[in-house]
Image (tube, grey):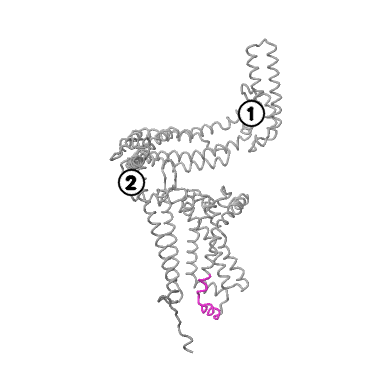
Amino acid sequence: MAKQFEKRDRRFLGIGVQSAIKGFFGGNALLSIAILLLICVFLGKEAFLFFPDHHKGLQLYRKSGQEYVDGMKRQVEDHADLNSLMAQAYFAEKADIAGREWGVVDAFGYLVDLAEDEGEDEIDAWADAREELEDAEEDAEVKRAESEARAAWGEKLGEILAKADRAEADRFGRLEAGEWERLKASMAEWDPVEEEPPAFVVQAEKDLKAKMGTFEAARNAFAAAVGPLNDLKETLRGKAMVVKEEAEADLTAVARKKALVEGAAASTNSEDRQRRLDEAAAIVIREKFPFAERTEVFYESKPEHARLAAEYLVALKAAMELVPRAPGSKEAEARLTQIRSELPDVLQDFSRNSVMVQEWRHDKPYGWWRSISAFFFGKDWVTNSSWHDFFGLLPLFTGSLLISVIALMVAVPFAVSAAIYVNQLARRWEQTIIKPAIEFVQAIPSVVLGFFGIMVLGTFLRELSQVEALSWVPGFPMAERLNILNAGLLLGLMAVPTIFTLCEDALNNVPRAFGEASLALGASKLQTVWRVIAPAAASGILAAVLLGFGRVIGETMVVLLVAGNKIAIPDFSEGIGVITQPAHTMTGIIAQETGEVDKGSLHWRALFMVGLILFVISLFLNWTAQRIIHRFRIA
């Protein structure tokens, strides 16, 4: 009998079957480790080369004067944001207190355009006849021709007015009842040759000016306040671009000259060879680019900037004094209140940027720490720019984090509750239905979920936000259907199977004796689950949540399709309503831009740096989950 249980290990070339199986599995494990190490090396090599190139780019950004110009640019852009609010306030006021007059003037403009387009021949004929009449007033034939031309124009105008579309003329419904017919009737007084409007329209224009004259003057003064400063910025912008282009050409002069000489040596065409040699001879190689000389214009402009900045503050104050204190429109009042609340911060930033402009020097060292922090804490991700590329991770990280948090808020309650129910409370037939149904979600391609988010979920959420009864909900009504909330809900759905499966494994690892002892002491099934089983599996559940977080923060296709892809830090002043704003993510930016950049470029390496950060985050989450499992494992 003992012979029947002897180990039989057949060997081939000295290798046994069991040894081969052991070597196969061990070799695959080592291969996995090797691949992981290669990924780390590959990502690290490309990513860490980013910082030296990024630092050089920022140094050139300062030396060329672009940093100096951007100080003015920020001042102009801050004013532009306020000016946009001012325009919104102006048009809200115009619509609410002068809607009728505005509607009449706009509708008249529509009728004029329509008449001049379709009655161009009749207008020209009448204009010619009137000109001839002025030259020969006593000629009866000329008078008759002018009368016929006027009659032809009147007939044509009647045809045009008959088919004029009121909905097209009054798109915003500003005309009151009967105003449309009064306007059409007054068109008989319109002189298309002299371009004089009828009395009805003239009166509407006067009433509109009387109601909006002060506000319009304030708006125009507000918009014009920054004009001179903007003109200076645009002038210096062009000069900074020239300096940058010359400096970049100087940095590549040696390589370009060498390439031309080598190309000339390899060319078999004498004309082409000579052309290359001439181009190589024209390239001047300097030991050092004369930044001091080329940036002198910026130093000379500092007094002018100081003067224009002071004039801007005076003009802005004068414009604000013209703004109505008590507008008739609630929306206009809200926008003006927002302007007044934001104005102190804008003025503070304006002063800070003025100091930066005055203190700017091209030869001031650009520190390594500032270069690194510009990437990790930068608020701008601007690529393929004719001005300067900025690589700031903060808006991408913020978008990824917000979407992931929403996804976990949706996924964790459903997944954990479902795992507890299926593992502890459900009947056998319920388990055979619920568990496969949840795990089936993993089989749905992410691109399909993305299309669902675009066509179904996003549209549903936006239409739901338009319901008047839900206007109290933060962020409602939603301006965009592709936003953080949409992406978070879909990622929450995708994370449910992962968290569910891992939570169920954690519950299965709780010794049966725990539950049996609780029941034996008289506890109910629910008491046993919530006071014994769930607390005992808490470490595994927490690890499942962390792994689910790693799952959603690394998702690409869904966020690329439904998050809105707006590279900007969401406006947290909206409170919870921030989740209805569009955003971009770290995974999305890699997928969107990798195929469009040149290999080895700064942009290429910036994307690898983002990928390395994602890789580190995922590793950290997995390591933390494993540590939790091992630390609190039940013996």
Kindly state the secondary structure of the residue where label 2 is placed. loop
Name which quarter of the figure residue 128 lies in.
Answer: top right
For the residues labelled 1 and 2, say whether their Cβ atoms are less than 8 Å apart.
no
Q: Is residue 432 visible?
A: yes
Span colored in magenta: 504-521
Quadrant of the snapshot with the C terminus = bottom left
Tell me the mark number nearer the camera, choosing from 1 and 2: 1
Nearer to us in this view, 473 or 502: 502
Pick out the residue farthest to the left.
287
Determine whether, in the image, residue 161 is placed left or right of residue 65. right
Q: Amino acid at mark 2?
A: Tyr
Residue at label 1?
Answer: 117
Q: Position of residue 583 (x, y in %)?
A: 50, 50
Question: How crowded is the residue under tag 1: few (<14 C-alpha within 10 Å), some, or many (20+)?
Answer: few
Q: Amino acid at mark 1?
A: Asp
Nearer to us in this view, 302 or 43: 43
Separation (CA) of disc 1 from disc 2: 61 Å
Residue drawn where x is 52% and y is 61% of the image: 408
State whether residue 239 is above or below residue 425.
Answer: above
Kindly state the secondary structure of the residue where label 1 is placed. helix
Does the magenta segment cover residue 512?
Answer: yes
Nearer to us in this view, 292 or 112: 292
Question: How crowded is the residue under tag 2: few (<14 C-alpha within 10 Å), some, or many (20+)?
Answer: some
Q: Position of residue 16 (x, y in %)?
A: 43, 77
| Residue 351 tag number | none
State whether residue 373 is above or below residue 2.
Answer: above
Determine whether, in the image, residue 412 is placed left or right of residue 49. right
Q: Position of residue 24 (x, y in %)?
A: 44, 71
Residue drawn where x is 40% and y is 61% of the image: 38
Does the magenta segment cover residue 55?
Answer: no
Residue at label 2?
Answer: 366
Name which quarter of the figure residue 122 lies in.
Answer: top right
